[in-house]
Image (cartoon, coloured by chain):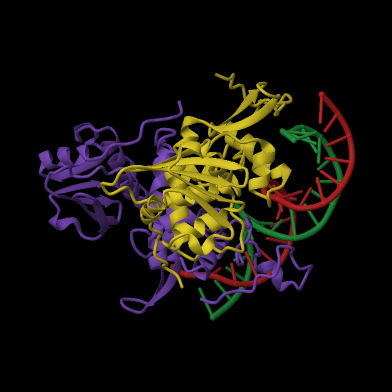
Chain colours: A purple, B yellow, C green, D red
Amino acid sequence: MKSQKVTSNVPEPETEQQAASQPRPAEHGRWYADGCGAAFALEVLGERWAMLIVRELLLGPRRFSQLRTALPKISARVLTERLEGLERHGVIERQEVTEPVPARFYALTEWGRAAEPAILALCRWGLSARAHDPGIGVSPVAAVLSLKANYKGADGGDPITVGLKIGDARFVARLGETMEVERGDPAEAQIVLSAEQPMPILAAFYRQTGLSNLAGSLSARGDIAAAQAAIARFAFPDRLTP
Amino acid sequence: MKSQKVTSNVPEPETEQQAASQPRPAEHGRWYADGCGAAFALEVLGERWAMLIVRELLLGPRRFSQLRTALPKISARVLTERLEGLERHGVIERQEVTEPVPARFYALTEWGRAAEPAILALCRWGLSARAHDPGIGVSPVAAVLSLKANYKGADGGDPITVGLKIGDARFVARLGETMEVERGDPAEAQIVLSAEQPMPILAAFYRQTGLSNLAGSLSARGDIAAAQAAIARFAFPDRLTP
DNA sequence: CAGAATCCCATTCGATACTG
DNA sequence: CAGTATCGAATGGGATTCTG
C-alpha cells in the first residue's frame, strides 16, 4: 500500500492520454474535504457498486466471475476499476491460489471486514423502507447477510445451527447470542434449508411463519421445532415509509 | 402534514409511452437491480454528498445556506439536486416557517432519522482507518456525531450533561446509558465546553486526556471531575490500517 | 438569501471487441 | 476465464447568471 501524493482537486489539464484510462476521483479520494469518519468512509466506499462488492466478500473470498454473477448489472470494466480502488485503499487484497487450479480471489482485509456493521446497518435501513421486492434478485450472500442484519439473539435459548443451501452456495449459521455465519457444508446443522433461489428462504424468515406454505420452492430437513425457534429469533424492521 | 405532490418539475409532454421498456438510469433510482436492503439504501443515499447532507440534518433542521457552510465543497446546484432527490425518496421534507422571518428548512422524516445508526457505523469505520486529520475541517454537527458514534455508555454511573458550544452552534448532550444530543442552550449542563472550531473539542475526547493542554483553544466550565468522567465514557476505534 | 436555469467540459458508463 | 482496450453516449457537476 503506498500513499499517493494528493496534489489538488483541480485536475491537471491533459497530462497525457494515459490519464484518461486511470480515473481520478478515487485516486486519493478527496471529494468531500471533510474530516468526519463517515466522509472518509464514503471516499473509500462511496463510489457506485463499491459497498455491494464489499458485501459480496463479507462471507468469504470470491472470484471475478462470481462477483459478476452476484452483481449482474455491473460491467467488467467497472468491476475492475472498483476492485483496483478497493485494493488501493486497503479494503481488499488479491489472493492467488494454485491449489486445485490456478485462480485469483478477492478477499477483504481486516479493515474491510470491519465494514460489516455499517453495511448491515444500511441493510436494515433499506429494509425499513419497503418490502423486499421479490421481483428483484438477491444474491445468496445478500440473502444470508439480510438475515444476519436482523438477528435478535437467542434470548437465553440454546444455540441453533442452521444450514443453508442456496443454489450452489452452502452456508452454516450458528444462532447464539449473535449470529455467526460462514461458508461451509451444512451436514452437521440441526436444520438445513434448501432452495434454488434466495427468495424462498428469505420469505420464510420474513413472514415469521412456518415453512409449509413454501414447500414447493423450499425444502427443509431436520428438527422442525428448532426451525420455528430459529425463525423466531429474527425480527425485521417496521416499515417507516408506506 | 405537507401535501406530498411530487413530479412537479417533470412536465410530461405527451410522453405517456413506454415505462417498462426504457430502463431509466437514475430517474427512479435503479442502478443496482438488487433486492438487498443495502442496495436500496444506496439507491437513495448512494449519490455523492447525499449521506453527508443527511448527517448534517441529524441534529435538527437546517437551511440551505447552513448546509453549504457545513459542506463547503458542495455546489449550490448539487445541493439543490440532492435535496430534491432526498425529498422525493422521502428522506427529508421541506419546512416553511414564517416565525421570526420567512425561511425554509430541510428536516429529516422519520425514515430519514432512522438512517442515523448506519451513518454512525460508517463514521466508526472511517475512524478505524486513520486518525482524524486536523487539517481537514469538520462541521460542528459532524464533530458531535463523531462523539455520539463512539459513546460507550455510563457503565452504571450517573448521567452527565455536557454542553457544547462550537462557534455559533449550541448542543446539549446527556451521557446516560446512551448518548442523547440535541441543539439547545447549554446553560443547565454540568460541564460546558466551548471552542470556536470543532477540532479542539474532538481532540479532548480523542486523546482520553484532560483539557488543560488545550486551554488555548478550548475553554471548559463546570465540574472538572465530571468532565474527566465524561471523557472516559468514549472510546475510539483501534486503527486497522497504518 | 434561496434557489432555478444555462452552458459546457470532464468524468463515467455500458457495450463490444480483443487478448493472454 | 479474467480481465483490457476502445469508443460513443450519458451524466455529473463547476461556474456563472438570473429571479423572487
Q: In this view, does A20 lie above or below D8?
A: below
Residue B199, horizontal then vertical, whole percent: 56, 57
Taking the image as shown, residue C7 lies to the left or right of residue B38, namely right
Quarter-of-image position of residue B26: top right
Residue visible at 24% across and 33% down? A208
Residue visible at 66% across and 65% down? A24
Residue A199, horizontal then vertical, whole percent: 33, 41
Q: Nearer the viewer, residue B152 or A31?
A: B152
Q: Is residue A24 visible?
A: yes
The mark tally for this picture is 0
Q: Is residue B34 above or below residue B241?
A: above
Residue visible at 56% across and 58% down? A43
Residue B227, horizontal then vertical, whole percent: 41, 52
Residue visible at 23% across and 47% down? A194
Q: Nearer the viewer, residue B118 or B23?
A: B118
Residue C10, horizontal then vertical, whole percent: 75, 60
Taking the image as shown, residue A35 lies to the left or right of residue A177, namely right
Quarter-of-image position of residue A126: top left
Taking the image as shown, residue B197 lies to the left or right of residue A18, namely left
